[in-house]
Amino acid sequence: MDKQEPTPEGFPPEQTGEIQIRVRFSETDKMGITWHGNYFSWFEMGRTELLRKEGIAYKDLEESGVMFAVVSAECSYKLPALYDDLLTLKTRVVRVTPIRIEHEYRLYRGDVLLAVGKTTLASVDREGKIRPIPENLVKLFKKREEQAR
């Protein structure tokens, strides 16, 4: 099977979750610049909606005892997001192991790249102990990871 060429944004469209975010006043400082910590909340929104795109609600996973704890998070800020900007967040799965999932994020204002992020999540049970990712999720995430190559 031929792989699709990456988009200019770097993510093939078939494996990308995309959401729109309007920067709210409460997310900015006195100068109208988004506080750096808000980017991680937006990344969580991207992960959740990427799952939803696959027909999986994170709430349902939690109710069944499947939880994911963020064990690593990073963000490289290129330009600031400003009050009332309409942003596009692109999210994709880049690596899956039996207990971890890695995501990458790209945040845009129009065609301008504002930030690039990455998170690693570990699968845990209700007590916070490491547990294997359920097989149906591993298959789904592995499919996404292979598309990324």
Image: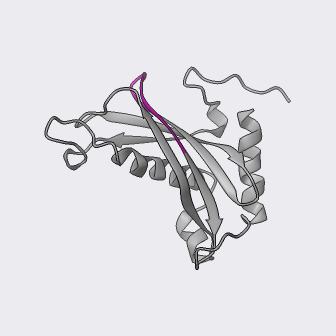
Front in this rendered view, residue 126 or 129: 129
Task: Assess whether residue 93 is covered by the magenta stretch.
Answer: no
Residue 138: x, y in percent? 75, 57
Q: How is the image coloured?
A: one colour
**Residue drawn 74% across the image and 66% down it:** 132
In the displayed structure, would residue 115 be above or below residue 121? Answer: above
> Does 81 sit left or right of 64 as displayed?
left
Side of 67 relative to 144 (left or right): left
Identify the image quadrant of residue 11: top right
Residue occupying the far right of the picture: 1
Which residue reaches farthest bottom? 127
Q: Position of residue 48 (x, y in %)?
A: 52, 55
Secondary structure character of the magenta stretch overall: strand
| Point 34% across, 47% down: residue | 38
The quarter of the image holding the N terminus is: top right
Q: Residue furthest left?
A: 30
99 above or below 87?
A: below
Quadrant in the picture for the C terminus? top right
Q: Is residue 100 placed above or below 13 in the rendered structure?
A: below
In the figure, 20 relative to 41: above or below? above
Give the residue at x 68% y 56%.
Answer: 100
Residue 28 occupies which quadrant of the picture?
top left
Give the x, y percent position of residue 127: 58, 79
For the record, the magenta segment spans 107-118
Question: Residue 77's x, y, as percent?
Answer: 40, 32
